[in-house]
Image: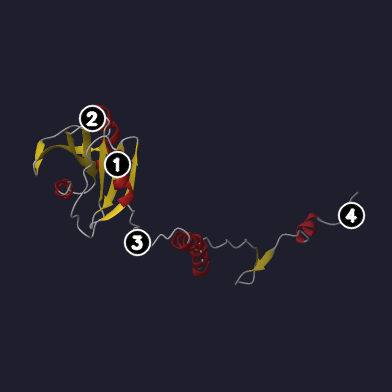
Amino acid sequence: MNSGRAPEDDQACSPVARGVREDGGVSDATPTQARSGRSPRDIALSLLVLLVPVVLLLGIYRLVFSGDAPIAAANEADTWATARHDAPYPVLEPVGLPATWTALSASYGAGTLRVGYVTAAGSGIQLVESATAANQLLPAELGTDARPGDLVTIGTRQWRAYPVARTDNRALVLVDSGRTTIVVGSAPQADLRGFAATLR
């Protein structure tokens, strides 16, 4: 049923938003586009959210795990005594190491002695002495890819150099007196030789 209104009246009553132009005419309003950039405050809040967990983890590391504490020296005296008493071979022990070197670990078991050191420069050196046959011990300690190098005379002993050992280390190996002695680590070759020279 026709209400008697003209089609133009329906358009005039349409709920379309309109705006006034500068020239006085009327135009449809277009929605304003949202800004895509972030304010400095938003960026600062985002950084804060990222930094809080980092600070918490650092605090836990330092307080609970003593992350900034100096390297704790191992008390290797008991290990040396046990090895000298129980080992089926004469035990070699370093004499006159620099005071700046720290014994980090020491253990003896199943005929194998292991003592680890940290040099003044922070490099690692481990001494391994064992009654295990060299053909079994060397792959286990140096890795299956380790290849022997030249013979090196240190003091009165002939050591075999291993220029490449497991995980970018290098090593010196001595087989005598019913034992296999390994000096292995990330320290420079000069430090390895110097350490081997202290073994008595």
| Above or below 22: residue 35 | above
Q: Secondary structure at mark 2?
A: helix
Q: Which circle, 4 or 2, is nearer the viewer? A: 2
176 over 41 or under it: above or below: above
Tag 4 near tag 2, CB within 8 Å: no
Which of the marked residues, 4 or 2, is nearer the chain's N terminus?
4
Residue at horizontal 22%, vertical 34%? 179
Q: Earlier in the sequence, mark 2 or mark 3?
A: 3
Q: Secondary structure at mark 3?
A: loop
* Disc number placed over residue 73 in the picture, else none: none
**Residue 35 coordinates in the image, percent (x, y):** 54, 63
> How far apart are the alpha carbons under marks 2 and 3?
36 Å
Q: Is residue 45 left or right of residue 164?
A: right
Name the residue type under label 3. Answer: Pro
For the residues carrying marks 1 and 2, which lies nearer the camera in this image?
1
Which residue bears the numbered disc 4?
3
Which of the labelled discs sits on residue 70, or is there none? 3
Q: Which residue is mark 2?
A: 134
Question: Which quadrant of the structure image shows residue 8?
Answer: bottom right
Label 4: how many Cα within 10 Å (few below 14, some 14–19, many 20+): few
Give the residue pinned by disc 1.
85
| Amino acid type, residue under disc 4 in the picture | Ser
